[in-house]
Image (cartoon, helix red, strand yellow):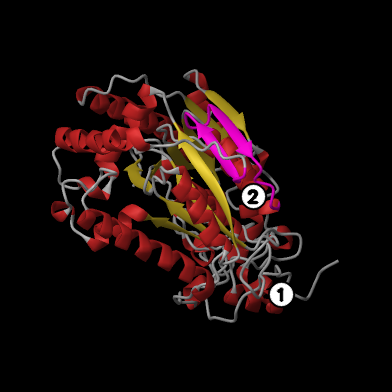
């Protein structure tokens, strides 16, 4: 049965004007063959897109969000404060940023409040008192710390009401047990549930790796000599150790992450579905350095067909060979640079994921021949065009005018009969994202552009309404490096492709 009404998710568009998304690059006819009469499986993304112009709008919905509420809060969870606990260089900020990224992806309005950001905004590093990091500091230094702390917590409380916040993540050392109980009481007065997450680490290798990572990425050490940065950071740690009290209070709801995921202790933390999702996410997370590579599949014999699942053509096979060479050379170059800097840690393993489509499997053949593990993941299959398979843009517009109008307004959530929207793709790749978080080695994903857009958007925090417009060209390998403060991105030219 053909539907004449648009199938739009409950998180429907707001009516803001938007243009129809560009054609998925992998489905786009190569060599200038696109045209009004050209037929292809995903012409639902074309619809004479040259007649539309992108307008800046922000729908305000997250990529994997299932529904909206008047309060702005989901899963009947109310307001939650996640309070991080742990000494410096234990991975707190990395965990906090990663958790915020995951919750925002689900549609949970989450914001991270880093106490260090408030310190930097309040007083320049060169003007910090010498005893700032010492617990028994002078009265003037204690007053300064109290003022910074008050500003941070006031903003946090205000955020719940003014921006309909649901989960506030408070990123600080929080070393004293009595102060943590006072913090819980303060949140309770505002009807906010408190979940503590302690990052406990006694593995010297992990601590050393975190110290060296911080010296590179922390805003505190921009422009510093690397050796001086490490020395100063270690001084901060030493000042905190004698006074730090690990969480042992059985009356608190807490999760203790030991050695960044080696072991996890959960105490209470039973206030609903959302807390369970948070704990589940933490069991999949680690902060070990690794790289994600994202690459398109090569050209196939029938590039425009979804159903045929055609094999690579001559150009596609040539591309596959170039992609293999580019990735391996990149890894050799990065390893050499680390060795020159004195980093003698072993090279990460590399695993390749593809979809179950022939073109992606064949694009990865060079890696399999070189001895790398290649796994097929059905969740990475391209977006299904449904009834638009084989139809031209004009046919789609004539047959489904209502859906085309909805697509014009909201290209992320709107789907055609028996087809998938980008929202559908984001939902079915959610489990894959958790597996990516769990990977301890490097990972290359070869997939269709519609899938790469969603995976990339998760790590880079791209709003849902921008996902259909992300571009992944065949002449580029995208490298994503998750870090403590953000996910860095590098676009690497693929040899022999322009």
Q: Say whether residue 243 is visible.
A: yes
| Mark seen at residue 400 | 1
Please state which of residues 175 and 217 is positioned toward the viewer in this rendering.
175
Start-end of magenta stretch: 251-272
Tell me where residue 381 appears, x and y as whole percent.
63, 45
Secondary structure under tag 2 reads helix
Q: Going by the picture, which residue comes out furthest to the right?
A: 1
Instruction: Look at mark 2 in the image and give the residue it sits on.
Output: 275
Above or below residue 237? Residue 32 is below
Q: Is residue 453 left or right of residue 202?
A: right
User: Mark 2 touching mark 1, by CB under 8 A?
Assistant: no
Above or below residue 279? Residue 138 is below
**Residue at position x 52%, y 67% in the image:** 465
Determine which quarter of the picture holds residue 216.
Answer: top left
Q: Earlier in the sequence, mark 2 or mark 1?
A: 2
**Residue 271 magenta-drawn?**
yes
Tell me where residue 23 appears, x and y as whole percent.
53, 61
Q: How many residues crowd mark 1 within 10 Å: few (<14), some (14–19), many (20+)?
A: some
Q: Is residue 209 left or right of residue 257?
A: left
Tell me where residue 103 appears, x and y as whole percent.
56, 54
Which one is closest to the eye, mark 2 or mark 1?
2
Q: Say whether residue 29 is visible.
A: no
Q: How many residues crowd mark 2 within 10 Å: few (<14), some (14–19), many (20+)?
A: some
Q: Is residue 52 left or right of residue 396?
A: left
Please state which of residues 350 and 355 is positioned toward the viewer in this rendering.
350
Q: Is residue 341 left or right of residue 408?
A: left
């Amino acid at each position: 049965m053909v539907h004449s009404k648009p199938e739009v998710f409950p998180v429907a568009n707001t009516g803001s004007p938007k243009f129809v998304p560009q054609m998925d690059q992998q489905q786009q006819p190569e060599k200038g063959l696109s045209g009004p009469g050209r037929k292809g499986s995903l012409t639902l993304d074309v619809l004479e897109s040259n007649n539309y112009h992108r307008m800046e709008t922000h729908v305000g919905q997250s990529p994997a969000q299932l529904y909206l509420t008047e309060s702005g809060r989901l899963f009947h969870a109310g307001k939650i404060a996640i309070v991080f606990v742990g000494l410096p260089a234990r991975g707190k900020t990395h965990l906090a940023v990663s958790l915020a990224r995951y919750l925002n992806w689900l549609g949970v309005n989450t914001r991270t409040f880093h106490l260090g950001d408030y310190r930097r905004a309040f007083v320049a590093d060169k003007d910090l008192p010498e005893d700032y990091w010492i617990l028994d500091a002078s009265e003037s230094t204690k007053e300064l710390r109290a003022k910074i702390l008050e500003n941070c917590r006031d903003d946090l409380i205000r955020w719940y009401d003014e921006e309909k916040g649901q989960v506030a993540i408070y990123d600080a050392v929080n070393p004293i047990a009595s102060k943590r109980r006072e913090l819980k009481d303060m949140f309770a007065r505002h009807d906010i549930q408190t979940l503590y997450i302690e990052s406990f680490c006694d593995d010297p290798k992990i601590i050393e790796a975190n110290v060296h990572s911080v010296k590179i990425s922390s805003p505190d050490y921009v422009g510093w000599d690397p050796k001086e940065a490490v020395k100063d950071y270690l001084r901060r740690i030493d000042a905190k150790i004698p006074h730090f009290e690990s969480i042992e209070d059985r009356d608190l709801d807490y999760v203790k992450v030991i050695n960044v995921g080696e072991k996890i202790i959960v105490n209470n933390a039973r206030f609903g579905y959302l807390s369970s999702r948070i704990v589940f996410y933490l069991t999949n997370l680690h902060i070990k350095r690794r790289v994600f590579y994202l690459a398109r599949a090569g050209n196939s014999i029938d590039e425009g067909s979804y159903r045929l699942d055609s094999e690579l053509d001559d150009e596609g096979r040539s591309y596959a060979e170039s992609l293999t060479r580019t990735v391996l050379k990149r890894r050799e170059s990065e390893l050499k640079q680390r060795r020159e800097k004195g980093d003698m840690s072993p090279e990460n393993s590399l695993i390749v994921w593809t979809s179950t489509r022939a073109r992606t499997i064949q694009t990865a053949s060079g890696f399999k021949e070189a001895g790398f593990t290649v796994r097929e993941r059905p969740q990475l299959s391209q977006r299904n065009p449904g009834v638009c398979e084989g139809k031209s843009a004009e046919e789609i517009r004539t047959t489904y005018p209502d859906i085309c109008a909805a697509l014009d307004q909201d290209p992320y959530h709107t789907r055609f009969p028996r087809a998938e929207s980008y929202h559908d793709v984001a939902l079915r790749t959610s489990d894959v994202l958790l597996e990516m978080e769990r990977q301890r080695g490097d990972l290359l994903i070869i997939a269709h552009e519609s899938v790469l857009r969603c995976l990339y958007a998760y790590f880079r925090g791209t709003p849902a309404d921008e996902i259909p417009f992300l571009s992944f060209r065949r002449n580029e390998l995208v490298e994503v490096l998750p870090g403590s403060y953000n996910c860095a991105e590098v676009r690497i030219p693929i040899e022999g492709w322009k």
